[in-house]
Image: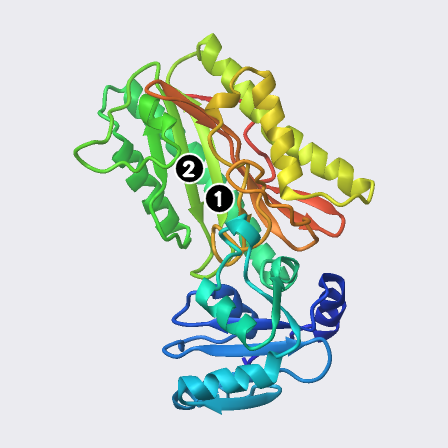
C-alpha cells in the first residue's frame, strides 16, 4: 500500500473549508501522533520529525529528514528533505507561513485523545507565521471511521465474545454449586483459552471482579490478591478482542449474580445502569431519525441523567463511552461530558462503547457495556442481543 492510498481529497477540501483551514498539517516523531501515521499509511519510521501538509488546494507536501526520505517513496506530492534544524525551520516557514493549519490539538486539553502534538511543536509552527486550529473534525472523518471489512470483523468478534462471556459466567456458577473453588483469575484464564480457540486476538486479559472488586472499574486480578467466588456475590466480566491484531475490537461488560435471585439493591442498580445504556442509544436513534446533529457529550448527559434520577449519580465515576477504531480507546468522538467535554459530532462510520456504571466502594459495582456502529441508516448495536437481565449463576 502506498502513502495516502485511497485518501478522499475531495472530502478533505470540503471539510477544511468548514473548519476554516488552508490545510491539515500532520506531524509525528517516534509515534507520538498515531493519527498522522494512520491517515498517511506510514509504518516503521519516526526516528526523525516529519511534517506533511494536506492542502485545501494543490498537491500534498512532505518535509522529511534526509536519512528517512526513502520512507516517503510513492508519496503523491512534493517531498522536501531537511537535515539540520535550521533547514527544518526554513522549510516549514516556506510551507505554512501565513496559513491557517489544522493540527491534533485540543484547546485546554479538553479531549486528551485528540491532543497529540506537543506544545513546543505548536510554538514552532506559530513562530514561522502559521495559525493553528484543532483538527478534531478531520480526525473523526479520516482516522476514526471503520471500513466495511473492519465492521465485518467487529461483528464477528462481538457475537463470539458475547457467547464466551455468558458461557464463562455460567460455568463459574456451575463450579461454585459443585463446591469447586472458583477465583477471578480462574475465570480470566477460561476466557483467554476461549479466545484462543476462537482465533480472537486481545492485548490484555479481561477484567473479572467478584463483589467488592467489581466496584473498581479498572480492577486487575492476579494470583495472590484475586478473590474466591462465594454465594451472593456480584460478578463483573469486562472482555475485549478482535479478529486480528490491529482490527476493530469488540468491547463488552456482562454482569451476573451468584444465587437464585439478586437482592433488591443489586436489581435496582442493574435496572438503572441498563436504563442509562438504553436511553443513550434511544436518544441517538431518535436524533438520527430526525436528521439532527448529536455529540458524544449530549449522549453522556442523557445516560448520566438516568443514573442521577435513580439516586446514584455520585457513583457513576467515568464517561459513558469511548471511541473505538484501530485502537480500543480510539481518537474519534467519546460519549463524554464528565471526564472531558467532547463536543465533536457523531458521524456515519464511527463506532464507540456505551457503558454506564454504578460503583459502591467496598461493596459491589455494576456496568453494562455494548458497542455502537453509526451506519448511514442509523445506529447498529453489537452484540445483536445485549444483556437485558442479570445472569443468575
* The N terminus - image quarter: bottom right
Name the outermost residue toward the top.
264
Decide which of 234, 181 is in the foreground and name it: 234
Decide which of 351, 46 is in the foreground and name it: 46
Q: Residues within 10 Å of mark 1 (few under 14, many from 20)?
A: many
**x and y percentages locating residue 164 in the rendered image:** 43, 39
Asked if the residue under mark 2 is in contact with the one under mark 1, i.e. CB atoms within 8 Å, the reply is yes
Which residue is at 66% across, 75% downward?
Answer: 99
Residue hosting label 2: 238
As helix, strand or loop, the secondary structure at mark 2 comes to strand
Decide which of 260, 15 is in the foreground and name it: 15
212 left or right of 261 in image:
left
Residue hosting label 1: 251
- Please say whether residue 228 is visible from this viewpoint: yes
Which residue is at 38% across, 71% downward?
Answer: 30
Decide which of 318, 220 is in the foreground and name it: 318
**x and y percentages locating residue 113 in the rendered image:** 50, 53
- Please say whether residue 118 is visible from this viewpoint: no
Name the outermost residue toward the right.
290
Residue 62 found in image quarter: bottom right
Which residue is at 23% across, 24% downward?
Answer: 180
Can you say whether 39 is above or below 85 in the image?
A: above
**x and y percentages locating residue 323 in the rendered image:** 55, 49
Can you say whether 296 is above or below 93 in the image?
A: above
The alpha-carbon separation of the residues under discs 1 and 2 comes to 8 Å
Can you say whether 134 is above or below 307 in the image?
A: below
Residue 220 found in image quarter: top left
As helix, strand or loop, the secondary structure at mark 1 comes to strand
Can you say whether 292 is above or below 29 in the image?
A: above
Name the outermost residue toward the left.
224
Amino acid at each position: 500500500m502506498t502513502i495516502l492510498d485511497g485518501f478522499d481529497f475531495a472530502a478533505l477540501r470540503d471539510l477544511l473549508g468548514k473548519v476554516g483551514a488552508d490545510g491539515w498539517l500532520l506531524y509525528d516523531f517516534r509515534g507520538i501522533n498515531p493519527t498522522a501515521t494512520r491517515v498517511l499509511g506510514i509504518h516503521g519510521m519516526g526516528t526523525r520529525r516529519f511534517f506533511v501538509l494536506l492542502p485545501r488546494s494543490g498537491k500534498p507536501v512532505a518535509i522529511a529528514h534526509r536519512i528517512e526520505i526513502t520512507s516517503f517513496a510513492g508519496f503523491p506530492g512534493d517531498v522536501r528533505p531537511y537535515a539540520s534544524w535550521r533547514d527544518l525551520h526554513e522549510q516549514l516557514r516556506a510551507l505554512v507561513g501565513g496559513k491557517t493549519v489544522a493540527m491534533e490539538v485540543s484547546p485546554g486539553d479538553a479531549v486528551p485523545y485528540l491532543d497529540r502534538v506537543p506544545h513546543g511543536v505548536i510554538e514552532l509552527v506559530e513562530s514561522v507565521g502559521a495559525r493553528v486550529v484543532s483538527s478534531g473534525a478531520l480526525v473523526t472523518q479520516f482516522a476514526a471511521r471503520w471500513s466495511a471489512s473492519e465492521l465485518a470483523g467487529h461483528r464477528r468478534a462481538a457475537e463470539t465474545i458475547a457467547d464466551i462471556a455468558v458461557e464463562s459466567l455460567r460455568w463459574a456458577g456451575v463450579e461454585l454449586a459443585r463446591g469447586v473453588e472458583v477465583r477471578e483469575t480462574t475465570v480470566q484464564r477460561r476466557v483467554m483459552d476461549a479466545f484462543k480457540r476462537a482465533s480472537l486476538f486481545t492485548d490484555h486479559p479481561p477484567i473479572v471482579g467478584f463483589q467488592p472488586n467489581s466496584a473498581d472499574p479498572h480492577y486487575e486480578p492476579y494470583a495472590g490478591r484475586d478473590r474466591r467466588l462465594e454465594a451472593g456475590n456480584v460478578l463483573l466480566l469486562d472482555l475485549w478482542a478482535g479478529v486480528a491484531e490491529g482490527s476493530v475490537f469488540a468491547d463488552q461488560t456482562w454482569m451476573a449474580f451468584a444465587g437464585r435471585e439478586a437482592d433488591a439493591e443489586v436489581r435496582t442498580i442493574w435496572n438503572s445502569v441498563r436504563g442509562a445504556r438504553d436511553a443513550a442509544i434511544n436518544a441517538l436513534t431518535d436524533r438520527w431519525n430526525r436528521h439532527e446533529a448529536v455529540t458524544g457529550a449530549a449522549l453522556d448527559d442523557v445516560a448520566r441523567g438516568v443514573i442521577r434520577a435513580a439516586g446514584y449519580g455520585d457513583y457513576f465515576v467515568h464517561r459513558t463511552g469511548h471511541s473505538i477504531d484501530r485502537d480500543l480507546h480510539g481518537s474519534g468522538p467519546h460519549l463524554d461530558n464528565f471526564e472531558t467535554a467532547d463536543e465533536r459530532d457523531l458521524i456515519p462510520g464511527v463506532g464507540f462503547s456505551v457503558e454506564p456504571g454504578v460503583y459502591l466502594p467496598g461493596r459491589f459495582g455494576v456496568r453494562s457495556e455494548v458497542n455502537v456502529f453509526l451506519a448511514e441508516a442509523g445506529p447498529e448495536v453489537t452484540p445483536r442481543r445485549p444483556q437485558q437481565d442479570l445472569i443468575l449463576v
